[in-house]
Image (tube, rainbow, N blue to C red):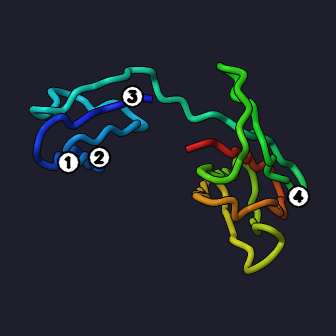
Amino acid sequence: MPKYTNSGSTVVSIGSLRLEPGESKNVIEFIPGVLPVGVTQDASTPSINPVILAQKVTGNATITIPETYTEALTGKAYNLTGNYMISIYVAVGECTVQFNGAGIARYVGLYEKFDFKCMDRVVDTIVLVVSGTVYVTVEGI
């Protein structure tokens, strides 16, 4: 991930990035244009959201979120304790989505996309009632 450091003596805000004096942060995307005075880019590795799970669903299904995943580029294994996004896209028909088999099911219609960010491991299973074709992805964020 790109990494930026504020070596100045004042707080710097660039979009949603806030750097205290002396603070370094890894960010998801590059900061475009000229950097503010005192801010340096320390690492330039491109940011890649790892795909943890990708599935095409054409009937009712229960999908289990894995507890670990292996990053394809590096081969490094991670525990999946949080920081992932679940995306549901309906290509044909419609579906309802329910997390962990509890609560009210969410309706997702034709050509709609439903995203759900999990900053902790709050979702273990995705229960889908599908009439058509639905694409499900889980990506690290």
Q: Which quadrant would residue 14 be assigned to in this image?
A: top left
Q: Nearer the viewer, mark 4 or mark 2?
A: 2
Left or right for 70, reference 63: left
Q: CA distance from mark 1 to mark 3?
A: 16 Å
Location of mark 3 (residue): 2
Tell which circle, 3 or 2, labels the residue nearer the N-terminal end. 3
Location of mark 2 (residue): 17
Q: Secondary structure at mark 2?
A: strand
Location of the N terminus (image quadrant)? top left
Q: CA distance from mark 1 to mark 4?
A: 42 Å
Residue shown at 86%/49% (left/top)? 58
Left or right for 31, reference 2: left
Residue shown at 84%/59% (left/top)? 131
The dot on residue 62 is: 4
Q: Amino acid at mark 1?
A: Ser
Q: Secondary structure at mark 3?
A: strand
Please tell me how crowded label 3 is: few (under 14), some (14-19), or many (20+) other residues with Cα within 10 Å.
some
Q: CA distance from mark 3 to mark 2?
A: 12 Å
Location of mark 1 (residue): 13
- Is the C-beta separation of discs 4 and 2 under 8 Å? no
Q: CA distance from mark 3 to mark 4?
A: 36 Å
Q: Amino acid at mark 4?
A: Thr
Q: Amino acid at mark 3?
A: Pro
Tell which circle, 1 or 3, labels the residue nearer the N-terminal end. 3
Tell which circle, 3 or 4, labels the residue nearer the N-terminal end. 3
Q: Nearer the viewer, mark 1 or mark 4?
A: 1
